[in-house]
Amino acid sequence: MKVSIDTDRCRGFGVCVSLCPEVFTLTDYGYSEVKVEDVPTELQGAVTEAVQACPEHAIEHT
């Protein structure tokens, strides 16, 4: 699974970071960014949950 964040949509709520800090982090400006684009199998469930929970629908995964 690959994951990315649409930086134009992200508003920095940080829900993804709280659900999967192994994959997501916050920039110095408070917006989310991906730390690991190729998501390990054991974290795919948490990433899927983060995708569904993002209030701005800014996270995409394939």
Image (cartoon, rainbow, N blue to C red):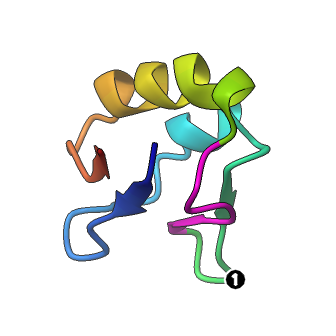
The residue that appears at 55% across and 17% down in the rendered structure is 45
Q: In this view, does 48 lie to the left or right of 26?
A: left
Q: Which of 33 and 48 is in front in this view?
A: 48
The residue that appears at 59% across and 81% down in the rendered structure is 29
Please identify the dominant SS of the magenta region: loop
Q: In this view, does 1 lie above or below 7?
A: above
The residue that appears at 56% across and 62% down in the rendered structure is 37
Q: In this view, does 9 lie to the left or right of 19?
A: left
Q: Is residue 57 left or right of residue 43?
A: left
Task: Measuring from the top left, give residue 52's x and y in whole percent.
Answer: 30, 23
Q: Give the range drawn in magenta.
A: 31-39
Q: Nearer the viewer, residue 7 or 36?
A: 36
- Badge 1 amino acid: Asp
The C terminus is located in which quarter? top left
Residue farthest toward the right in the current orientation of the protein: 22
Q: How crowded is mark 1: few (under 14 residues within 10 Å), some or many (20 or more)?
A: few
Q: Is residue 47 above or below residue 2?
A: above
Q: In this view, does 21 lie above or below 36?
A: above
Task: Measuring from the top left, give residue 26's x and y in whole percent.
Answer: 66, 65
The residue that appears at 27% across and 49% down in the rendered structure is 60
**Quarter of image, res 43:** top right
Q: Is residue 33 left or right of residue 51?
A: right
Residue at the disc numbered 1? 28
Task: Measuring from the top left, give residue 18's x and y in whole percent.
Answer: 68, 32
Q: Which of 51 and 8 is in front in this view?
A: 51
Q: In this view, does 50 lie above or below 28?
A: above
